[in-house]
Image: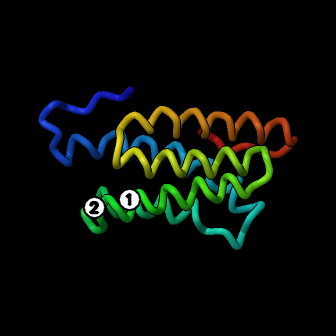
Amino acid sequence: MLPVASSGTIIEAESPVIWAMDRAERVLPYFEEKYPNDDRPRKAVEAARAWVRGETSLSDVRAAAFGAHAAARDAAKGSARAAARAAGHAAATAHVADHAPHAAAFADLAERERAKEGRKTVKA
C-alpha cells in the first residue's frame, strides 16, 4: 500500500495516482499496438490525469477504470491484457490508493509477457 496522508488532501491523494499512471502509460502501447481501435485503456489513463488536474469527477474516473478492465477481459492473454489491467488499476487509484501497486504489478507483468512474446519492451 502506498501512503496517503491522514489529512487526505487532494494534493496528497494525487501522488499515488500520478505514480500509477506513469507506470501504466509506459506499457499502454502494448495494448494499443494489438488493439488500435480500442481506446478504453487510454481513456482510463486520460481520465485519471484529468482528475489530478481537477477537470473531471471521481465517478467519471471510476467508469473509465471499469472500461479499461473490460478491455482487458476482451483482450487475448499476454502483454496487451496486462497493459489494459495496469491502466484500469491506475485510474482506480484515484478512488482507492491501494490500486497503485496493482497498476505497477500489471505493468511489470506486461513487460514480462512482452519479452516472452519476443517483442521489444519499453525502456524504463
Q: Is residue 5 above or below residue 91?
A: above
Mark 2 residue type: Arg
Q: Given the current orientation, which residue lies at the most extreme right position?
A: 118
| Left or right: where 38 falls relative to 24 | right
- The residue carrying pointer 1 sits among few (fewer than 14), some (14 to 19) or many (20 or more) residues within 10 Å by Cα, namely many
Q: Is residue 41 above or below residue 14?
A: below
Q: Given the current orientation, which residue lies at the most extreme bottom position?
A: 37
Q: Residue at x 44, y 52 (%)?
A: 91
| Frontmost residue, 39 versus 75 | 75
Q: Residue at x 41, y 63 (%)?
A: 47
What number of labels is visible? 2
Q: Residue 61: percent from the left, percent from the top? A: 39, 60
Q: Secondary structure at mark 2?
A: loop
Q: Are marks 1 and 2 in contact (CB under 8 Å)?
A: yes
Q: Which mark is residue 49?
A: 1
Q: Residue 111: percent from the left, percent from the top? A: 70, 38
| Left or right: where 44 falls relative to 10 | right
Q: Residue 5: percent from the left, percent from the top? A: 19, 31
Q: Residue at x 20, y 48 (%)?
A: 10
Mark 1 residue type: Arg
Q: Secondary structure at mark 1?
A: helix
Residue 7 lies in quadrant: top left
Q: CA distance from mark 1 to mark 2?
A: 6 Å
| Left or right: where 114 falls relative to 103 | right
Q: Is residue 14 above or below residue 5?
A: below
Q: Residue 52: percent from the left, percent from the top? A: 30, 56
Q: How is the image coloured?
A: rainbow
- The residue carrying pointer 2 sits among few (fewer than 14), some (14 to 19) or many (20 or more) residues within 10 Å by Cα, namely few
Q: Which mark is residue 115?
A: none
Q: Given the current orientation, which residue lies at the most extreme left position?
A: 7
Residue that carries the numbered disc 2 in the rendered image: 53
